[in-house]
Amino acid sequence: MLADLLKSNDKIFKLVCGAGNECVQDVERLTYLYSKAGAQFFDICAKPEILKAAKDGINKSGIANDRYICVSVGMRGDPHIFKANINDELCTECGACEKVCMQEAIKDNKINSEKCIGCARCKNVCPNDAIYMTEHDIDLKKVLPELIKMGIDCIELHATSIDDEDVKEKWDIINNLYDGIVSICIDRLNLGNRQVLDRLTDMLSARAPYTTIIQADGIPMSGADDEYKTTLQAVAMAEIIQDAKLPVYILISGGTNSKTATLANLCNIKYNGVAIGSYARKIVKQYVNDADFYEPKVFDKALSVAKNLVESIG
Ligand code: SF4
Ligand code: SF4
């Protein structure tokens, strides 16, 4: 049970496949690889076909026993529900966006929206302002019952919006539909420290002690580099949650990499685990996208890289 894992002293490695990653092949391969490498917890987007892909990947790894799946739910204003689009009339086909997309979601000036995770890197480098983002909100009342029926271990709400009403509405829906472990992913892009803690206190009033994970998010989708500086905000956010002494489990996320655990330990943070997305996907991307991914000559290299990262969080 996920609850037992959280209660134990084990540090949990959570692989974040991407709350906006709707690519079946990507998710199946990532979950297979990281499950083999020792990751116990997997974060995926809230879609039945992606949940199936994650289950397939984990089952294929042969270690389905101690492996847990969390479905992530975004909300209005949350970058995780954005998708990039190209305005063909403004695009001059310079190729700059394709080079910076870590998801390899852009090819020949076209965006594969299943792969796009809404990070906006492409938008930020476009010299012609030809890229715009659109929001893709989901109907929780429709999607969650199906996912719960299929079998999940956790639901995560990205509670970063400035829209208090939207947060409350989605939080109530989740709590009414699901009585398992839930996770609140929260960052300080829109909220100050006081607002973060007020929101969490409010949300936790609906929950029994130690049935909630706080995913302390530094800077979402920013962990491309393996630097201490990149992970600084993630550790700082975890410290804010820790100092508030809330009855929760803390996972560090948002700018996480192989340096996160070292920095957190130096700062005396008592974290329960680390959730790594951008960096974990980046270091295995060349193998995961290889047509021969399942062949030992490719897979063994990927496994060695993934294992090093998983072991770094101890
Ligand atoms: S750079 Fe980010 S937002 Fe742009 S297409 Fe790639 S994943 Fe999507
Ligand atoms: S960066 Fe902008 S102009 Fe260049 S290919 Fe991409 S969308 Fe087109």
Image (tube, rainbow, N blue to C red):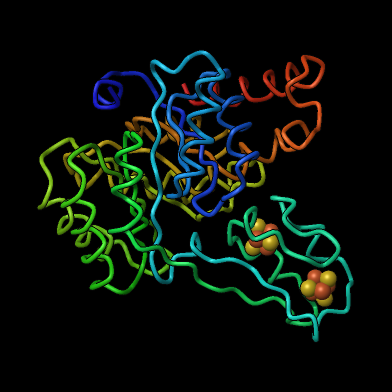
Q: Which residue is pictured at 53% across the width and 22% down the height? A: 35
Q: Nearer the viewer, residue 90 or 203?
A: 90
Work out which residue is located at the far bottom of the displayed protein and give it: 89
Q: Tell me how many marks there are.
A: 0
Is residue 175 toward the left or the right of residue 251 in the image?
left
Which quadrant of the view contains residue 82? Answer: bottom right
Which quadrant of the view contains residue 98? Answer: bottom right
Give coordinates of residue 2: x percent, y percent: 30, 26
Which quadrant of the view contains residue 87? Answer: bottom right
Q: Nearer the viewer, residue 198 or 185?
A: 185
Is residue 263 toward the left or the right of residue 207 in the image?
right
Query: Ligand 1 appears in which quadrant?
Result: bottom right
Give coordinates of residue 212: x percent, y percent: 23, 41
Give coordinates of residue 70: x percent, y percent: 38, 39
Up/down of 225 relative to 314, above or below: below
Give coordinates of residue 116: x percent, y percent: 63, 57
Is residue 268 toward the left or the right of residue 78 in the image?
left
Q: Which residue is pictured at 50% across the width and 29% down the height? A: 262
Q: Which residue is pictured at 49% across the width and 59% down the height? A: 80
Quadrant of the frame with the N terminus = top left
Q: Nearer the viewer, residue 70 or 260?
A: 70
Is residue 24 toward the left or the right of residue 149 in the image?
right
